[in-house]
Every structure is written in C-alpha cells, then in structure tokens.
Amino acid sequence: MTADDIYGAALALMAESRDKAKGYQDKVVPLTNLLLATAYPAEQALRRARGHPPLAAPPKVETEGEELPYQMDLLTECFPYGLAGMLILDDDTGKANFFNAMFDTALAKYSPADFEEVVDWYGGGRE
C-alpha cells in the first residue's frame, strides 16, 4: 500500500474527491511520514508478535507512490483515519476529532502487549 492509496481512502472518509481536494496533495508525504513515526511502536509490537524482523527505525517516504513497509492491518485500518484527521483539521475540527479518535482506537487494536520474563531480584519462590 502506498501513501497515495492511503490518501485516496482518507479523501473517501472526508467525502472529498481528488478533483476538489487539490489543497491537500502537497501534505500527503509529510503527514504520511508523521503517521509512520506515530505508529512505529505499534508496528514493532506487531512484528514481534507475528515473528517478523523488527525495523531499525521509523521509515520515511519521499513520494506518494512508495510502498509503505508496515503491516497491512495498520495501513488499511489506521492510516486513512489518521491522515483524514490531519488533513481536515483546519476545515472541521469535529470531523478531525472523530477521525483522530478512530485512528487512536484502531492503533490500540493493533498494539499487542509485549510480555517479558520478570527477574525475581528478591529470591522469593512460590511455594
């Protein structure tokens, strides 16, 4: 999935067409990079949970046509809401708040817990 795919989905959520939404196009790459950074912890947790190798750092895109190297769940369910919320913020804060809440909810859905072994520093055992 590309940044342009996410942009198309975000426009659909906003009930906008590409023809009428020309003012948003120049914001797609920088806002997609912000989404990639914001969702990085969730992406890493999903990768660990699914046995995929971790990313060394949050990726960045230079163009709308680049493939985003995140799990498809995050890209399809989270990113369109996040992008829509950021694009429409100046035009309609009510819609922006709704889209941002949907983004946060979807991001939490795909943020699995990371379980780690706890070291018993006190030497107490179960008896």
Image (cartoon, rainbow, N blue to C red):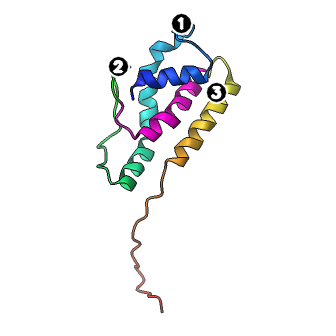
- Estimate the spatial distance between the alpha carbons at disc 1 and disc 2, rounded to whole Å: 19 Å
Answer whether residue 38 is visible to the viewer in this image: no
Tell me which numbered mark, 1 or 2, is placed earlier along the sequence.
Answer: 1
Tell me which numbered mark, 3 or 1, is placed earlier along the sequence.
Answer: 1
Using a 10 Å C-alpha cutoff, classify the residue at mark 2 as few (fewer than 14 neighbours), some (14 to 19) or many (20 or more): some
Answer whether residue 108 is visible to the viewer in this image: yes
Which-is-in-front pick, marks 1 and 2? 1
Q: Left of 17 or right of it: where is 40? A: left
> What residue lies at 43% left-to-right and 59% top-to-bottom?
114
Determine if the magenta segment contains residue 81.
yes
> What residue lies at 52% left-to-right and 29% top-to-bottom?
80
Q: Amino acid at mark 2?
A: Thr
Could you tell me if the residues under marks 2 and 3 are in contact, i.e. CB atoms within 8 Å? Answer: no
User: x, y percentage for residue 37?
Assistant: 42, 36
User: x, y percentage for residue 105?
Assistant: 59, 43
Determine if the magenta segment contains residue 32.
no
Count the marks. Answer: 3
Question: Disc 3 marks which residue?
Answer: 96
Question: Disc 1 marks which residue?
Answer: 19
Question: Disc 2 marks which residue?
Answer: 63
The stretch in magenta equals 68-88
